[in-house]
Image (cartoon, rainbow, N blue to C red):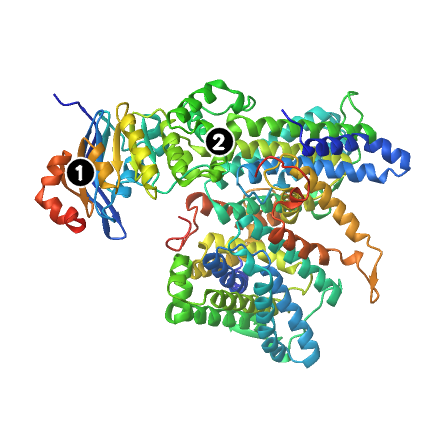
C-alpha cells in the first residue's frame, strides 16, 4: 500500500469532512431546535458557490468575494426563513419535506435563469493555487490545506459559541427542551431566524470553498445535501459534537474508501470485477454505515437529551 | 348506502380513463396514450406509498427505489436475452415473479431496519437506502451504469397479452390500477388496515390495548414495496428504457408530492395527484408566454416550486379540498 | 375471609435523572377490590401506573399479577394477560369514530390482525362486543361521532370504554375524573361503582369524595413511598396521613 497516497487521501478526507461539518452544523441546529426538516439547505450551499463566483468575477479577488458572500448568503437564509420556513415549524415532517423540496426546485430554476445552465468556475489567487510540502517530498495543494484550517477554526468557534455563550446556551436549551426557551421569555422567532441565518452563512462558506475544487453547477447542492443528512442522522439530530465526529468519519470513509477500495477488493476478487465494483461499493459505504448505526442506535451516536422521546 | 357526488366524480374519471386509447385515436394523437399510461403507472406507485404515508403515517422517502428495482428486472432480463441469447429471461411471467420477489425481499430488509426508527430518522434512513440502490445501479457498468439500459424487447407474456401493442399495454395498466384501488379499499377497511391507521393515530394507546405494531407496519411496508415494484415492471415495458435516475431520491419526492396534491389518506387521492402533477408539468412547461425574451414554460419549476409551498401552507388537503362532497375523512 | 391478592408490588424502584420517582414501593391489591391511590402531585402515581403496564422499565423490584411475575412481559403482553389502563390525559384515536375506537380495542384481543380482506365494520364478532360496551357506558347513541365531536365528559367515558374493551381482569385508572364537571363526575362515580363488581381496580384520583365513597382500601403515596394503607376510615384517622397529605388540604 502506498503510504504517501494514504496520507494525502486522509487529508482530503478531513477536507471533505470539514466541508460537510460546515453544512451539517447549521442543519442539525435547525433540525434539533425547530424540529424542522430542511431539504433546501443544499441550495444555500449552491448560492454560496454562485455568489462567490460572481463576486470573484466582479472584484477580481477571491478573498474579497468570499467576504462579500457570507453576509449575502446570510441574508438569503434570513429571507427564506421569514417568507417560507417560519410558517412550517409547527407542521409535520411531511409538510416540511414537501415545502423545502419546492424550495429546491425554485432555487435550481432561479439559478439556471440567472447564471445559465452551464457551470461556472472560481479562479484562485496565485498564493492559494500553489502547493505546500506537508512533510519533505510530499506536496499538498495550499487551498485544500486552507480549507482544513478554516474548517477547524470555524468548528472551534462554533464549539465556543455553543458551549460558552448565552446564544449557545439558548440553542442547547432549545435542542433539548423546546418549551423551556419560550418560558424564559426569549424572542424565539428572532432566535430561530438568527440561527437559520447563521446556518445559511456556514453553508455558504462551505459552498464558496468547495467551488474552486468541485464545479459550480446546478444541483451541486443536492448531492452534498444527502451526504449532510447522513452526517447529522449518524451524529444524532441536534448535536454539534455528533455532527463534527460523524462528518469527519464520513469524509474519511468516502475519500479513503474511493481510492483504496479497488486495491483492497483485488485481494478478494478478480482485478477487472474489482475495478467495476469498487466505485459502487464505495458510494454505498456511507449509507451502509448509516443503516448500521441506526439499526443499533435509532437516535444516532449522540442523541441530545430529551429529543425524540 | 347513499351515492355521493364524490362517487360520481370518481366514476367519471375512471370511465374517461377507460376510453383514453379511443379518444386519442379519434383525436389522431397517440402521444397522449403514452402520457396517460405513465400517469397511471405512477398513480399505482403513489397508491402503494399512500398506504404507508397516508394511512400509516410512515413517511418513506425512498419509494422510487422499488420502481427502479422492478424496471431493472425487466431491463436485465431483456439485456441477457438480447446480448447472450438467453431467451427464457424474456419470459414475462418469470420477470414478473422475479420483480415481485425481489421487491418484497428488499422492502423486508429496508423496512425491518428503518421501522425501528421514528420521525425524521425514518425519513432519512429510507432515503439513504434508496440512494444505496441508486448508486448500485450507477456503479454496475454491465447494465449501463449512469446511462441506463435500452430495452430492445418487452416482456413476453406468452400470447396472453401483447405488450408491444400500445392499447393492450394501456389496458393492462388500467386494469392493474383498478385492482390496486380495490385492494387498497379492502385493505384499509380490514382489521389489518385498522391496525395500520390506529398506529398512525396513537401508537402509545395501541400498545396499551395490546398491539405490537411493528410486524403490521413491516407487512404494510412490504406490500407497498411489492406494488411499487410491479409499477416498475409496467414502467420498463412502457418506456423501453431503464436508468438509475428512476430511483433518484427526487423521484421519491415526486411520489410524495402526488400523494399530498391528491389529499392524504384518501383512496383516490394518489390518482388525482398523479394526474395533476404530470399534467401540471406538461401544462406549465408549454406555457406560450415570453417575458423579456425568456420563455416562461422553460422555467416552469420556478412557478411549480412556490406553488408547492403554497399548497403545503394553505391548501393542506390538496385538490381534495376543491372537489365537492367529502371523501373518506382524513 | 379476605380474597387472594391479584396484584403484588414488591420493593419497586424507579429513578429519573437522579430523582426517585418510585422509592421502594410495596403494595397489594386484592381480587375484586377497588384500591385507590392518593397523594399530592409529584408523588409518583402516574409513574407507578406506567411501571405496572410496562410502558417504562423499573430499576428494581417485582410485580406479580395473578401470581405470575410480569417483569419480562412487554406492554402489549401485559394487556393480553388482563391488565388494562386508562390515561390521565385522554388518549384516544382522534380521527376514528366512537365505535371504531372501541372496535380497535376489541380486535386487539381476538387473535392476530393479519386479516386483509373482511371489512371491520361488517364483522359482528367485533361490532357486537363493542356496541355492548358502549351501551354499558351510555355512549351508544354517539357511536358514529368522531372523537373530536364528543364533550370532555364523553371523551373520558370513551377512554374507559376502550380500556374495558380489552376484556381485562384488572383496571388501572389514572385520574378518570380529571377535568370533569360535577355532573359528569357524579355519573362516572355511578359507572365505577358498577364496574367494581366485575373487576379489580387500582384507582388514582384527586377527587376525595369519589375516592372515599368508592374505595375498599386506600394507599397514600408521598414522594414515591407508600406511607399508609387501610380502609377509608383507617386512612381518615391516620395521624401521619393527616400531617403529610390531608392536613394540607383540610
Number of callouts in the render?
Answer: 2
Q: Residues within 10 Å of mark 1 (few under 14, many from 20)?
A: many
Q: Give x and y (percent) for residue A130.
A: 61, 76
With B318 as the anchor, is B160 left or right in this view? right
Taking the image as drawn, is residue A130 in sight? Answer: no
Q: CA distance from mark 2 to mark 1?
A: 37 Å
> What number is the disc on residue B195?
2
Q: In what element is the residue under mark 2?
A: helix
Name which quarter of the figure residue A210 lies in. Answer: bottom right
In which quadrant is the C terminus of chain B drawn? top right
Instruction: Give the x, y percent position of residue C164.
Output: 36, 28
SS state under label 1? strand
Q: Is residue B208 left or right of residue A24?
A: left
Quadrant in the rendering for residue A213: bottom right
Q: Which of the chains bears the disc numbered 2?
A: B
Q: Which residue is mark 1?
A: C219
Front-most of residues A126 and B97 = B97
Bin the neighbour count of mark 2 within 10 Å (Cα to Cα): few under 14, some 14-19, many 20 and up.
many
Q: Position of residue B80 (x, y in %)?
A: 73, 33
In the foreground, C167 or A194: C167
Residue A258 shows in this picture: yes
**Left or right placement of residue C204 versus residue B226 in this view:** left
Question: Percent position (x, y) of residue C8?
Answer: 20, 31
Instruction: Describe residue A251's horizontal placement relative to residue B94 as left or right.
Output: left
Q: Which numbered disc covers residue A233?
A: none
Amino acid at each position: 500500500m502506498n503510504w504517501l497516497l494514504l496520507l494525502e487521501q486522509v487529508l482530503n478526507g478531513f477536507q471533505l469532512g470539514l466541508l460537510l461539518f460546515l453544512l451539517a452544523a447549521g442543519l442539525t441546529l435547525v433540525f434539533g431546535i425547530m424540529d424542522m426538516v430542511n431539504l433546501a439547505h443544499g441550495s444555500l450551499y449552491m448560492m454560496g458557490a454562485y455568489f462567490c463566483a460572481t463576486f470573484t468575477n466582479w472584484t477580481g479577488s477571491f478573498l474579497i468575494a468570499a467576504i462579500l458572500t457570507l453576509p449575502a448568503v446570510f441574508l438569503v437564509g434570513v429571507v427564506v426563513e421569514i417568507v417560507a420556513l417560519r410558517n412550517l415549524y409547527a407542521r409535520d415532517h411531511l409538510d416540511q419535506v414537501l415545502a423545502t423540496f419546492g424550495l429546491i426546485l425554485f432555487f435550481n430554476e432561479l439559478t439556471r435563469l440567472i447564471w445559465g445552465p452551464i457551470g461556472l468556475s472560481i479562479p484562485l489567487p496565485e498564493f492559494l493555487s500553489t502547493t505546500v510540502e506537508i512533510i519533505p517530498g510530499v506536496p499538498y495543494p495550499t487551498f485544500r490545506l486552507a480549507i482544513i484550517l478554516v474548517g477547524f477554526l470555524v468548528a472551534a468557534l462554533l464549539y465556543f459559541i455553543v458551549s460558552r455563550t448565552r446564544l449557545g446556551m439558548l440553542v442547547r436549551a432549545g435542542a433539548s427542551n423546546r418549551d423551556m426557551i419560550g418560558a424564559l421569555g426569549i424572542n424565539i422567532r428572532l432566535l430561530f431566524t438568527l440561527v437559520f441565518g447563521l446556518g445559511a452563512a456556514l453553508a455558504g462558506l462551505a459552498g464558496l470553498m468547495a467551488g474552486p475544487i468541485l464545479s459550480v453547477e446546478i444541483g451541486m447542492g443536492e448531492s452534498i445535501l444527502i451526504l449532510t443528512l447522513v452526517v447529522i442522522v449518524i451524529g444524532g439530530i441536534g448535536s454539534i459534537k455528533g455532527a463534527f465526529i460523524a462528518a469527519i468519519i464520513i469524509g474519511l470513509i468516502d475519500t479513503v474508501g474511493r481510492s483504496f477500495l479497488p486495491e483492497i477488493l483485488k485481494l478478494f476478487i478478480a482485478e477487472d470485477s474489482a475495478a467495476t465494483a469498487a466505485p459502487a461499493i464505495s458510494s454505498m459505504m456511507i449509507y451502509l454505515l448509516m443503516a448500521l448505526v441506526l439499526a443499533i442506535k435509532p437516535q444516532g451516536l449522540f442523541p441530545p437529551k430529551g429529543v425524540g422521546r | 348506502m347513499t351515492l355521493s357526488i364524490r362517487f360520481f366524480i370518481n366514476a367519471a374519471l375512471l370511465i374517461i380513463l377507460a376510453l383514453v386509447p379511443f379518444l386519442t385515436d379519434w383525436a389522431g394523437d397517440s402521444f397522449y396514450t403514452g402520457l396517460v399510461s405513465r400517469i397511471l403507472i405512477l398513480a399505482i406507485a403513489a397508491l402503494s406509498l399512500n398506504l404507508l404515508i397516508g394511512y400509516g403515517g410512515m413517511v418513506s422517502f425512498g419509494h422510487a427505489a422499488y420502481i427502479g428495482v422492478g424496471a431493472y428486472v425487466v431491463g436485465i432480463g431483456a439485456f441477457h436475452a438480447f446480448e447472450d441469447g438467453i431467451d427464457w429471461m424474456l419470459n414475462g411471467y418469470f420477470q414478473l415473479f422475479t420483480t415481485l420477489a425481489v421487491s418484497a425481499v428488499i422492502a423486508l430488509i429496508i423496512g425491518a431496519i428503518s421501522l425501528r426508527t421514528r420521525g425524521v430518522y425514518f425519513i432519512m434512513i429510507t432515503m439513504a437506502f434508496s440512494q444505496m440502490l441508486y448508486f448500485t445501479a450507477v456503479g454496475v457498468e454491465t447494465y449501463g451504469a449512469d446511462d441506463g439500459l435500452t430495452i430492445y424487447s418487452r416482456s413476453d407474456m406468452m400470447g396472453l397479452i401483447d405488450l408491444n401493442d400500445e392499447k393492450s399495454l394501456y389496458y393492462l395498466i388500467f386494469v392493474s390500477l383498478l385492482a390496486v384501488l380495490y385492494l387498497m379499499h379492502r385493505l384499509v377497511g380490514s382489521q389489518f388496515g385498522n391496525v395500520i391507521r390506529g398506529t398512525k393515530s396513537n401508537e402509545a394507546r395501541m400498545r396499551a390495548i395490546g398491539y405490537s405494531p411493528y410486524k403490521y407496519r413491516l407487512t404494510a411496508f412490504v406490500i407497498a414495496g411489492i406494488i411499487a415494484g410491479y409499477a416498475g415492471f409496467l414502467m420498463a415495458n412502457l418506456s423501453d428504457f431503464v436508468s438509475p435516475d428512476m430511483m433518484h431520491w427526487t423521484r421519491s419526492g415526486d411520489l410524495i408530492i402526488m400523494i399530498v396534491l391528491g389529499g392524504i389518506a384518501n383512496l383516490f387521492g394518489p390518482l388525482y395527484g398523479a394526474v395533476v402533477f404530470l399534467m401540471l408539468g406538461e401544462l406549465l412547461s408549454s406555457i406560450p408566454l415570453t417575458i423579456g425574451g425568456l420563455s416562461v414554460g422553460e422555467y416552469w419549476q420556478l412557478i411549480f416550486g412556490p406553488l408547492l409551498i403554497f399548497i403545503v401552507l394553505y391548501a393542506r388537503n390538496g385538490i381534495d379540498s376543491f372537489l365537492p362532497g367529502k371523501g373518506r375523512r382524513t | 375471609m379476605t380474597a387472594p391478592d391479584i396484584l403484588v408490588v414488591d420493593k419497586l424502584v424507579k429513578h429519573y435523572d437522579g430523582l426517585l420517582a418510585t422509592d421502594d414501593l410495596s403494595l397489594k391489591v386484592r381480587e375484586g377490590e377497588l384500591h385507590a391511590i392518593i397523594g399530592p402531585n409529584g408523588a409518583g402515581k402516574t409513574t407507578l401506573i406506567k411501571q405496572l403496564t410496562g410502558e417504562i422499565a423499573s430499576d428494581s423490584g417485582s410485580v406479580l399479577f395473578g401470581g405470575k411475575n410480569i417483569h419480562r412481559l412487554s406492554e402489549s403482553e401485559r394487556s393480553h394477560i388482563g391488565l388494562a389502563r386508562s390515561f390521565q390525559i385522554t388518549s384516544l384515536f382522534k380521527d376514528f369514530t366512537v365505535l371504531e375506537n372501541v372496535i380497535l380495542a376489541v380486535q386487539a384481543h381476538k387473535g392476530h390482525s393479519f386479516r386483509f380482506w373482511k371489512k371491520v365494520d361488517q364483522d359482528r364478532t367485533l361490532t357486537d362486543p363493542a356496541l355492548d360496551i358502549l351501551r354499558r357506558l351510555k355512549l351508544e347513541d354517539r357511536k358514529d361521532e368522531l372523537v373530536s365531536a364528543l364533550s370532555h365528559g364523553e371523551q373520558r367515558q370513551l377512554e374507559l370504554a376502550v380500556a374495558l374493551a380489552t376484556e381485562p381482569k384488572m383496571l388501572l385508572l389514572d385520574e378518570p375524573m380529571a377535568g370533569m364537571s360535577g355532573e359528569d363526575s357524579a355519573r362516572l362515580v355511578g359507572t365505577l361503582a358498577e364496574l367494581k363488581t366485575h373487576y379489580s381496580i387500582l384507582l388514582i384520583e384527586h377527587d376525595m369524595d369519589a375516592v372515599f365513597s368508592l374505595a375498599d382500601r386506600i394507599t397514600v403515596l408521598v414522594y414515591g413511598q407508600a406511607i399508609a394503607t387501610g380502609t377509608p376510615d383507617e386512612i381518615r384517622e391516620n395521624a401521619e396521613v393527616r400531617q403529610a397529605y390531608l392536613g394540607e388540604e383540610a
